[in-house]
Amino acid sequence: CPHPVLNVSSRLRSLSRLQRIQGHMMSSHVEPEVLLEKVGRAGVITMNRPKVLNALNLSMIRQISPQLKKWENDTETDIIIIKGVGGKAFCAGGDIRAVTEAGKLGDSLAQDFFREEYILNNAIGTCRKPYIALIDGITMGGGVGLSVHGRFRVATEKTLFAMPETAIGLFPDVGGGHFLPRLRGKLGLFLALTGFRLKGRDVQRAGVATHFVESKKIPDLERELVELKSSSAENVSRVLDSYQNQSTLDSEKPFVLHQHMSDIDRLFSSSSVEGILQNLKADGSEFSKKQAEILSKMSPTSLKITYKQLQAGASLSLQDVLVMEYRLSQACMVQTNRLNPKWNPSTLEEVSDQSVDQCFSSLGEKDLTF
């Protein structure tokens, strides 16, 4: 039974939040959270919440989705560019805290947010026009969903990519089950389970970005893309390649995981998460010890869900992966230990296959449809 005092205090909190929001709306000049502009023959989407590292919320999704479709069908628009402002982040993720709080209160935001976010991820993945994400800065969670399924992803030395969801009791969603298992060897599974952070040129070397261009060259790159007379995918590719060729920064440094790739492939090849942990502990190298320690801090339920998600996703289309991930998102919202480091169950052994399988089961008419 819900605690009455907590209930009242959370209601009061919601009320004061509402008053704050209304206060914001009354102020004379509210910066739009996302800018949608037509520049030449390019549609340009700019995430405009620099104070929260351009975190994605439902109102932004609801502005981007119809505009993306409009530009895709518009004969006057040839390409679509997406970027963030503020110099720190492309988009550091979804507004998960708000969604999680809503989930606890039984609010429909937890359903709407994931449903509409995944529909947008799919629209990006199927977009018929060249879609270019300038991932200059932090790109995590929801920001990955806005970029990785598009045709072109341009990383810079400021790019920081990670899917850190297992640390907060979630799983690498937004189509992570589609792109992660398609990275070479067991790299995707490694990134998904450990939340390992890739920086700069390594984001491209891992296969997450298609190009690497120095951050200071991005404004010129954008200008040249916008001014393209004929914006076919080939022409866009040519421009991106030429900027990449001018960017020699860090080119002599090897891929950060280069010396560990064969270890990752060997140690993360197991039919279970328990097996992976056993491999890591038995291996005894510094690298393995560190990964075992990282995994021991993650949500055991999340680790098992993520393992199964990537296993299944390897042979599914992006759409089917998103249907699966929507089921998982709703299962995770029901379990209330989100964002709580005291995991329950607290060990991998206590997480039954049955409880994991349940998270993947159909929601019937509430399933995600496109």
Image (cartoon, grey):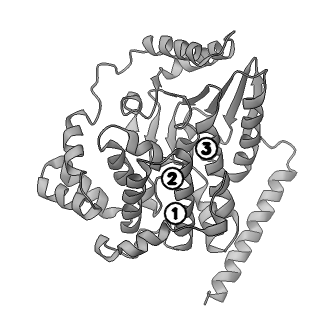
Image quadrant assignment for residue 262: top left
Q: CA distance from mark 2 to mark 3?
A: 12 Å
Q: Could you give the CA–CA distance between mark 1 and mark 2, rounded to whole angstroms? A: 9 Å
Category of crowding for the residue at label 2, using alpha-carbon neighbours closer than 10 angstroms: few (below 14), some (14–19), many (at least 20): many
Q: CA distance from mark 1 to mark 3?
A: 17 Å
Q: Secondary structure at mark 1?
A: helix
Q: Residue at x 42, y 47 (%)?
A: 315
Q: Amino acid at mark 2?
A: Asp
Task: Report the front residue among 124 and 336.
Answer: 124
Q: Position of residue 99 (x, y in %)?
A: 63, 62
Q: Earlier in the sequence, mark 2 or mark 3?
A: 3
Question: Which residue position holds label 1?
Answer: 328
Q: Residue drawn 46% across and 23% down?
A: 211
Q: Are marks 1 and 2 in contact (CB under 8 Å)?
A: yes
Residue at 72% x, 41% y: name it: 64
Quarter of the image where one finds residue 293: bottom left
- The amino acid sitting under disc 1 is Leu
* Labels in figure, total: 3
- The mark found on residue 320 in the picture is none
SS for callout 3:
helix
Q: As displayed, is residue 16 above or below residue 287?
A: below
**Disc 3 marks which amino acid?**
Asn
Badge 3: how crowded within 10 Å, few (<14), some, or many (20+)? many
Reading the image, the residue beneath label 2 is 173
Q: Quadrant of residue 256?
A: top left
- Residue 173 in percent (x, y) is at 51, 53
Q: Residue at x 29, y 19 (%)?
A: 252
State whether residue 6 is above or below residue 338: below
Could you say where residue 234 lies in the image, as x and y percent from the top left?
56, 15
Please rate how many residues cluster around mark 1, counting C-alpha atoms within 10 Å: few if below 14, some from 14 to 19, many from 20: many
Please give the label number shown on residue 122: 3
Quick one: SS at disc 2? loop
